[in-house]
Image (cartoon, rainbow, N blue to C red):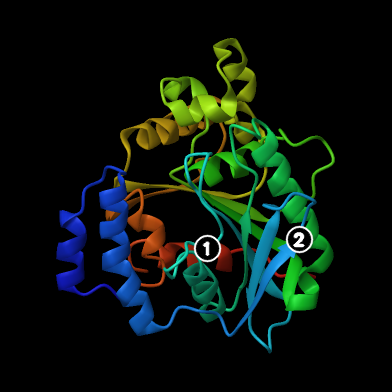
Amino acid sequence: MLVDESLAALRQLSWQITPETRAAHHALFSPLHEQCGYLAPVVHRDLPYGADARQRLDVHTAPDAAGRPVLVFVHGGGFVAGGKTVPGSPFYDHIGGWAARHHLVAVTMTYRLAPEHRWPAGAEDVADAVSWVHQHIAEHGGDPDRIILMGHSAGGAHVAGYLAGQAGTAMPGVAAAVLLSAFFDPALVHDQPTIRAYFGDDFDRYPVQSSVAGLVECKSPLLIATAERDLPPCHRQATTLLDAMQTAGRPHPLFLTIPDHTHLSEIYSLGLDDEAFGGILARFVSRLPLTK
């Protein structure tokens, strides 16, 4: 858990994303994860879910796992960077450790990047990874009928695109999804180079590429979250989606503002500050019905 001293240090970190602030976040959270122990008991590395070199995933589980819900995590990185692990750090293996402690199986995946692979490549990669999970996760103690997708930042955009049907019509189902500081409507952030790297420069296509309308129609339970000190566009994205759901008369999804945290710390701190986010995530997962 984060003690008062660590929380005070967190509040001093900038909400902006630069190499310096990213390093400061790593310096704060990495030793805390090392002290607590962050790895799942068993980790199967670099399992291919597609032909591309980046279409790889890790499965985090326990020797006695059987029929456990499955948390599939899709990393961020501004559509142009990132991976399922961050060399020299606990990230994102710490998600697997958190999952194992909460009697889940976790899958962390890497996907193809822009600008070489543009919209809807991310949603397509999520679809392929979910298909792999449906076919193979029982071998690792997971329940293919209780898959929870969780995407952070650009990874959240790819999860949202998947849920909105942007990967095609024959997509395997999921039980629920967590959209953490995700991007839903590229038109709201069209001036950002990384958005244009993935969605392209044809602004007339942005309404078609938006996942808002598809998420309004999505039947899966959703947990939508942003950090208190998040990037301003992430707050606008969440508000746009929630407003669209309210206008359509859809029941309000579970929404959370994660106190004290930044865009980076909200995910780096999973397992350390569960009072802020992890506990609510665990409760959200626990509400899923048992497989009959």
Q: Is residue 245 left or right of residue 209?
A: left
Rendered image: mark on residue 48: 2
Q: What label sits on residue 199 in the rendered view?
A: none
Q: Residue tagged by mark 1?
A: 85
Task: Tell me how far mark 1 sits from mark 2, CA to CA.
Answer: 15 Å
Q: Please name whichever residue, 142 or 91, is drawn nearer the observer in this view of the structure.
A: 91
Q: 168 or 248: which is nearer to us? A: 168
The x, y position of residue 227, in whole percent, is 33, 48
Instruction: Please determine whether, in this image, residue 231 is positioned above or below residue 119.
Output: below
- Residue 104 image-quadrant placement: bottom right
Instruction: Note whether residue 50 is visible.
Output: yes
Residue type at tag 1: Thr
* Number of marks: 2
x, y percent for residue 70: 66, 67
Q: Nearer the viewer, residue 54 or 263?
A: 54
**x then y, percent, for residue 146:** 70, 63
Residue 287, by quadrant, is: bottom right
SS at mark 2 in the image: strand
Residue at x 47%, y 44% (from the top left corner): 153
Q: Residues within 10 Å of mark 2 (few under 14, many from 20)?
A: some
SS for callout 1: loop
The amino acid type, in three-letter code, at marker 2 is Pro
Image quadrant for the C terminus?
Answer: bottom right
Where residue 5 appears, as percent x and y from the top left, is 15, 72
Placement of 64 over or under 85, stated as above or below? below
The mark nearer the N terminus, 1 or 2, is 2
